[in-house]
Amino acid sequence: FLPDTAGAGRFRGALGLVREYRLLEDEALVQVRSDRQVNPPYGLFGGSPGAPGRIIMNPGTPEERIAPAKFIGKMRRNELLRAEMPGAGGYGNPLQRDPWAVAEDVRQEKLSAATARDVYGVVLDGQAPDEEATRTLRASLGRREEAATGNTTGRA
C-alpha cells in the first residue's frame, strides 16, 4: 500500500498499491495500459480525489523516467518497472471522520501524522487523538474552509 494516496473523506478512499517488476531475462517487450494518471479518481460530497497513478522506469537510478499511461517499450536485464496504482476518492467531509479511525490509519501507516493533522484535523498524542486539540483544530480548519468556499452551512 502507498501511504497518503487515499482520497480524504469522512469515509476515506482505498490506498493505491505499488507493484514492481524486475526483468531477469536479457530483453523483453513490455506493454502498459494504465489509467488515472492525468485525472485522478474523484471524491464525492466533499471528499478529496485519490492520488493519481504513475509508472516509473528504473526508480531511484540515473535512468529513472516517468512513463506514459499507455506505452509499448523494451526492458533490458535488471531494469525495474514500478507501477503505482491510483488511490480511490474519499466520500464526505474529512473533518467529520472519526478521530479514532484516523489514529488507526496512522498506526497502520496508511496516513502520515501530518496528513492526519493538516487534512483530517486530528492532533495525535502518541497513538491516540488529543480530543481537545482536535476539536480546536477542526473548528479552525472548518472556519478556513467556510471562508474559502462561502459555505456557511457547516456541510462540505
Image (cartoon, rainbow, N blue to C red):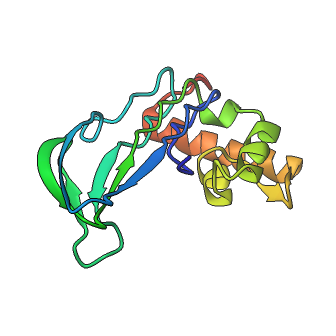
Q: Which residue is drawn at the image coordinates 12% and 44% (left, top)? A: 72
Displayed quadrant of residue 27: bottom left
Q: Percent x, y for residue 62? A: 25, 79
| Residue lying furthest bottom | 62
Q: Which residue is drawn at the image coordinates 73% and 42% (left, top)? A: 102
Location of the C terminus by quadrant is top right
Q: Percent x, y for residue 63? A: 22, 73
In the image, 17: left or right of 121? left
Q: Percent x, y for residue 49? A: 43, 34
Judging depth in this view, the residue of 34 and 155 nearest the camera is 34
Judging depth in this view, the residue of 63 and 131 nearest the camera is 63
Q: Percent x, y for residue 107? A: 77, 52
| Residue lying furthest front | 25
Q: Which residue is drawn at the image coordinates 27% and 33% (left, top)? A: 35
Q: Which residue is drawn at the image coordinates 25% and 69% (left, top)? A: 64
In the image, 66: left or right of 72? right
Number of numbered markers: 0
Displayed quadrant of residue 149: top left
Displayed quadrant of residue 79: bottom left
